[in-house]
Image (cartoon, rainbow, N blue to C red):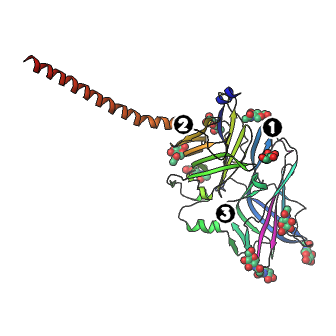
Amino acid sequence: MAASSSRAVLCAALLFFTLLGYQSSAEIVNLEVKEGNSTCIKAEFSAQISVVYSVTNGTKTVSMSLPATASVSNDSSCGGSGGAPRLVATFGEGHSLSLGFTSNGSQYRVDNVTVVYNLNDSATFPESTSADRVTVTTAPAGIVAGINTTYRCESASTVTLGGGGVNVSFSSVRMEAYMPGSEFSVNETVCTADRAASTTPVPKTSAATTAPAPTVPGNPEQGKYNITNNGSICLLAHMAVQLNITVSPSQNKTVQEIVNLQPTLTKSTGSCEPSSATLVLTDDRTNLSFSFSLLAVVWSDAGVMFRLPEAFTASNGSLDYLRGTLGRSYVCSAEQILPVVRSFSLNVFRVHVQPFGVSGDQFETAEECQLDEDNMLIPIIVGAALAGLVLIVLIAYLIGRKRSHAGYQTI
Ligand SMILES: *[C@@H]1O[C@H](CO)[C@@H](O)[C@H](O)[C@H]1NC(C)=O
Ligand SMILES: *[C@@H]1O[C@H](CO)[C@@H](O)[C@H](O)[C@H]1NC(C)=O
Ligand SMILES: *[C@@H]1O[C@H](CO)[C@@H](O)[C@H](O)[C@H]1NC(C)=O
Ligand SMILES: *[C@@H]1O[C@H](CO)[C@@H](O)[C@H](O)[C@H]1NC(C)=O
Ligand SMILES: *[C@@H]1O[C@H](CO)[C@@H](O)[C@H](O)[C@H]1NC(C)=O
Ligand SMILES: *[C@@H]1O[C@H](CO)[C@@H](O)[C@H](O)[C@H]1NC(C)=O
Ligand SMILES: *[C@@H]1O[C@H](CO)[C@@H](O)[C@H](O)[C@H]1NC(C)=O
Ligand SMILES: *[C@@H]1O[C@H](CO)[C@@H](O)[C@H](O)[C@H]1NC(C)=O
Ligand SMILES: *[C@@H]1O[C@H](CO)[C@@H](O)[C@H](O)[C@H]1NC(C)=O
């Protein structure tokens, strides 16, 4: 076992990426809750729901978007009979997304977001080990607006439910509860992210309407991420990540964006299983997920294929990057370009990762990547060349001295 495990190789596959800033390709869903003939909640938004679930040999992540066909269920309520107003949208094979509202008279807010997903839906959750309907819920989602105003938020914002297994990302939101009439109020409460975006010169959202010139930020900062399993760290990842996305919001337009993940704004979640590990890096626009798998045989090709859920998500299940040996950590200081799909690649810098066999919160012995070794080679060659030169000069000097010495003696 010891001999074979030292040959075991870990293989990193980057599986799934969502760029949440682009609304152009996401569906906007219209929902309305009525009691009698008066409307109390009206909502227009797009929502992307990602779920991590268990399969026999690890976990998988799926991303589903709330479809335009989602319907308002009878569980929705205007809160007439004492309960809180509630919007429940059902979709697919027994899934739902609900928003519960509260108000204090001058403001209203989304008090909780609840997702019910049905693992028995094998088209959405292939190979799930469970067939349960799972309910996850979250505390207030940061959606707050004044009474008699429409909440508006074009920017994407993500809420995490159920301890990290489920993320819901809302974008292009127009929403009102406790409505005075049956139409959206003219006055609006604009979310902080939109207000920030409109005052910064760099356009962040609605790629379709902005100039295609990519603004290239500087080198990304190194983030130090870790995943904990049962109280102890099981995955360590220190790295600087830059995303390179090429999107075509319309047939004629191509927009390229270079985005740095900012460690202070990036949250890490994930899981550790005996033969697979997942690291999910999330900020308000992106949801980047790395899957590492442990290969028993060196040349086996990890072929976990994922569905491609939406136009603005990209995933590739057959990547093979950051390959290291079990019991070691992988180090690469040089920039590496990791193409995922044609329209999306990752530039990573200053990488130090260990997805398996972390003990005592410390990296094991580092194993340098080929690129770094090649970079090391240049100074070695230069050094060797210099040493060679010195040697030649020395030999030449010694020979010259011996000759002149010999010549002197013959006289
Ligand atoms: C709407 O509600 C009012 C009372 O609130 C009622 O008089 C009216 O008939 C209702 N209209 C319809 C179309 O149900
Ligand atoms: C996990 O199991 C499925 C089938 O059960 C298989 O297709 C897939 O390759 C396995 N993945 C890994 C990483 O072993
Ligand atoms: C959601 O919030 C509403 C209003 O506070 C509350 O009545 C409801 O019980 C909450 N639902 C869950 C699942 O926490
Ligand atoms: C309602 O809640 C908001 C914050 O949640 C607070 O700023 C506001 O003062 C509250 N208004 C009243 C009347 O309590
Ligand atoms: C909201 O509008 C309704 C109807 O126009 C009005 O009765 C109510 O006082 C308004 N509430 C606030 C807090 O402005
Ligand atoms: C967590 O660790 C404790 C003590 O180390 C152990 O008793 C328990 O079974 C572990 N739980 C899981 C889910 O691994
Ligand atoms: C981004 O990707 C495009 C095409 O894949 C490439 O031409 C460009 O050099 C990349 N830019 C950076 C900063 O990596
Ligand atoms: C694309 O460009 C062609 C000609 O340059 C123009 O006729 C067409 O309307 C454009 N389509 C879109 C969607 O902008
Ligand atoms: C996934 O990655 C592999 C290896 O880099 C590449 O050959 C393949 O074309 C990619 N798949 C897609 C759909 O781009």
Residue 146 visible: no
Callout in the foreground (2, 1): 2
Q: Which residue is mark 2?
A: 369
Among the two numbered marks 3 and 1 on one chain, the one whose residue lies closer to the N terminus = 1
Give the quadrant of ligand 4. Answer: bottom right
Q: Residue 87 sits in which quadrant? A: bottom right
Foreground: 170 or 164? 164
Q: Where's residue 223, x and y in %?
A: 59, 52
Q: Which residue is mark 1?
A: 56
Give the Cα separation between the discs numbered 2 and 3: 42 Å
- Asked whether residue 121 is drawn in magenta, I would say yes
Q: Is residue 190 left or right of residue 117?
A: left
The answer as to whether callout 1 falls within 8 Å of ligand 2 is yes
Among the two numbered marks 2 and 1 on one chain, the one whose residue lies closer to the N terminus = 1
Predominant SS along the magenta part: strand
Q: Residue at x 59, y 48 (%)?
A: 238
Callout in the foreground (3, 1): 1
The stretch in magenta equals 95-123
- Asked whether residue 109 is drawn in magenta, I would say yes
Give the Cα separation between the discs numbered 3 and 1: 39 Å
Q: Secondary structure at mark 3?
A: loop
Q: Where's residue 367, x and y in %?
A: 56, 37
The answer as to whether callout 3 falls within 8 Å of ligand 8 is no
Q: Residue 68 sits in which quadrant? A: bottom right
